[in-house]
Image: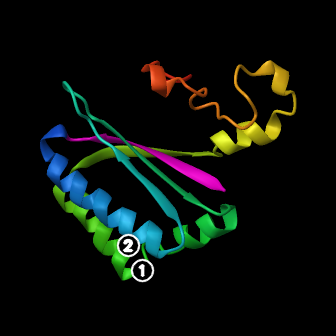
Amino acid sequence: MITCVVRHTIDPGKIEAFERFGRRWMELVRARGGTHHGYLLPAEGASDGALALFGFPGLAAYEEYRRLFGRDPEFIEADRIRDESGCVLRHGRTFMRPLLPGDLAAADTDTDSVPWPATGGPEEPPGAGDRGLPGPGR
């Protein structure tokens, strides 16, 4: 799997247009075989940053999706939301690969090095939730 992280600099006064833009792209990524993990938008204070996270099974699938830019009428329509509203000032993308909780369990063959049994998970040691204690990484 390949994950694309898109960092947007947005016009905070045009957040509603950006949300329309984002909702449309979430639909298009899903319709073209990807998994969109959503957008992270400013919530507190003055901020002009937003993130999008989406993935495809591999680079070839992502490249097939990218070939549709500027050609597919739905892609053109989605970009028109951005262009006509001016909600996105600039953006850049980075490609990453996920490290998921299941990957941690599979990679760790030395169960003596973790503070929970192999049947538990790194998200929350057994019983932590019962005592109201936060698990690791929270």
Vertical relation: 28 (above or below) 73: above
Q: Position of residue 28 (x, y in %)?
A: 40, 70
Vertical relation: 32 (above or below) 58: below
Measure the C-alpha gap from mark 1 to mark 2.
5 Å
Stretch in magenta: 1-11
Q: Is residue 21 left or right of residue 129?
A: left
Three-letter code for the amino acid on which mark 1 is drawn: Asp
- Which labelled disc corresponds to residue 75? 2
Three-letter code for the amino acid on which mark 2 is drawn: Phe
Tell me which secondary structure the magenta stretch mostly adopts.
strand
Q: Position of residue 50 (x, y in %)?
A: 34, 40
Q: Sort mark 2 into few (<14), some (14-19) or many (20+) by Cα contacts within 10 Å.
A: some
Contact flag, marks 1 and 2 (Cβ < 8 Å): yes
Q: Residue 102's image quarter?
A: top right
Q: Tell me the residue that label 1 is attached to.
A: 72
Determine the secondary structure under disc 2.
helix
Q: Is residue 87 left or right of residue 5?
A: left
In this view, the residue in front, 35 or 50, is 35
Q: Position of residue 104 (x, y in %)?
A: 72, 36
Q: Residue 118's image quarter?
A: top right
Q: Which residue is located at x 23 percent, y 54 percent?
A: 19
Q: Which residue is located at x 65 percent, y 35 percent?
A: 121
Asked whether the viewer can see residue 39, the reply is yes
Q: Is residue 98 magenta?
A: no
Q: Position of residue 129 (x, y in %)?
A: 47, 27
